[in-house]
Amino acid sequence: MHHHTVYHHTDYPSTMDLESHFHVLLLGTGLTESITAAALAKAGFKVVHIDINSYYGASEASLTTEELKTWIEAFLKSSDSVSPLASVHGESPSSSRSYSLSLSPSVFASTGPFITSLIGSGVARYGGFRLLERTCVYSAAGFKSVPGSKEDIFKSKELSLVDKRKLMRFLTFASGDFECSSEIQGRESMSFLEFLEEVFSINKQLASALTYALAFCSTSSDTIIPALTRIKHYLRSAGRYGPSPFLVGQYGGLGELAQGFCRVCAVSGGTYILGHDILAFQEANAEGVTSHCLNLGGIPENLTSDIIIVSSDLLSKLKNEDGADLEGHSSEGSHIAHCIAIIDGTIASLLTQQAASEEGRTEETDSVDVDDGQARTVDSALLVYPPNVLSTGSAQSPVNAIINGEGTLSCPRGKSLLYLSTAMDKNTSDRQNSDAERLLRPYLDATLSLARTTDASTPKELFSAFYVKSSRTFSAPFLDSFKQRDILVCPSLPSHFAESGDAAAVYAEALFRETAKHLGRLDFESMDFWPPLPMDPDDEDIS
């Protein structure tokens, strides 16, 4: 194993310790940058990877409760909005380090670019994973399990025989070559929800469950092909590691996995510098060759590189004297309201409304997940509230709630984590709608009122944080002007909780090949993104 060094903000490496010229300098340790750094270092390029934060993961980081509070304070200071973009309630637990709270809670499919990169890079050997145990959708009757496979449909006690036949027909269609089918001809712009009702005669409630909790559509107007493409991917992922198509990363998910890719980069000779701010940036051009020079606070030696890869969040740090106006070249991306809640109690079941109201009056409680009469704990679950279904809620997009229990190793025994998120209307003129707590509080309360802990009591909220995450997208000509200066900008990850991992791997491979091309590798198109690893009998087994 190569010796590697990580410089934190308390370290002051002398010129002797730190080599100063690198092939590639990466700014930001988000998931995309971290996958890219690992692939470049493994391909033999000299890499230095820098983050102004003292932790790995950037926008995808996994933080302790104290780090989260500090993050929110900094977030509020940097926000110029008049409305409260973040709020915190309750005391953060004394065992702050026992928690790993994700700024980007997510699940990822067990086939696809991200899992391929986890295995190909060797990060799967460092990380821990769990299968997403269940997906439930909320209706006026409470939570119901969503059938995600033909086996689920057969076993379902909630579906009538007629509904089962319609569902089987639809899933067979979705897992085949639907692109040119007669069912879609002439309906390309129809919404997926309408398509299910009209073409497959699926009733409204079941169509809503499929739209929001199987295809994960973000609006009622999402069209057919993207929704079917996601369902086909998920159906093909089911069965690889177990019945669910989805995996959940342990120790906080994507932040921990970003750190795993950073470890692979460091083992392959990469240098890490965390917690140092960027004081100055300059470019030199000698005989047509661009060289970038970065001056970091607390490090006397300037760092130079042939190429820079920068997260879109840190692009403003690379303004030189003629600093281009970023605002003028970018447009608003998504605005996502988030809630992170620490819950007292291990969640054991999710009741229907009827069971919740009848508790104490009847022996039989109707619970989504009583398994052979045994109460099991819920360690990883996804709950979906379709738009306009919760009477007290006002979200216009689906609200997704992810439960993480102690089995995900992100909270201590006897505690659970609840992550809620929903897309906000970016065109809203109502300032109050940009208040994450106002938007998400009804859904947090509803989830807690329908959940029961292992001792059959209602779980209690100990700590909660609400905030809005916004992204910006830059125009293609603006990004090209950077590329001509050997500066590559990482796109923001999609805000969708099931898509960010795969998107990061796809972006990273494109950045890897673009960098190799800029650095003169003639085989940049055919190079292995991940060279073959030494054989490990456990390689495929990541669950």
Image (tube, rainbow, N blue to C red):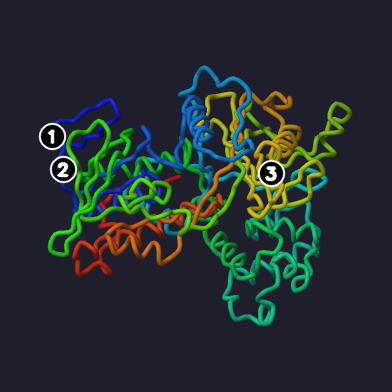
Residue 339, horizontal then vertical, whole percent: 61, 37
According to the image, label 1 marks what residue?
15
- Disc 2/disc 1 C-alpha distance (Å): 8 Å
Q: Residues within 10 Å of mark 1 (few under 14, many from 20)?
A: few
Q: Residues within 10 Å of mark 3 (few under 14, many from 20)?
A: few
- Secondary element under disc 3, as helix, strand or loop, is helix
Task: State left or right for residue 369 relative to residue 293.
Answer: right
- Residue that protrudes farthest toward the right in the picture: 361
> Is there CB contact under 8 Å for labels 2 and 1?
yes
Task: State left or right for residue 100 relative to residue 81.
Answer: left
Q: Nearer the viewer, residue 282 or 174?
A: 282
Residue 214, horizontal then vertical, whole percent: 64, 57
Q: Residue at x 59, y 47 (%)?
A: 336
Q: Say if 539 sits above or below 361 in the image.
A: below
Residue 94 shows in the view: yes
Q: Residue at x 43, y 40 (%)?
A: 255
According to the image, label 2 marks what residue?
20
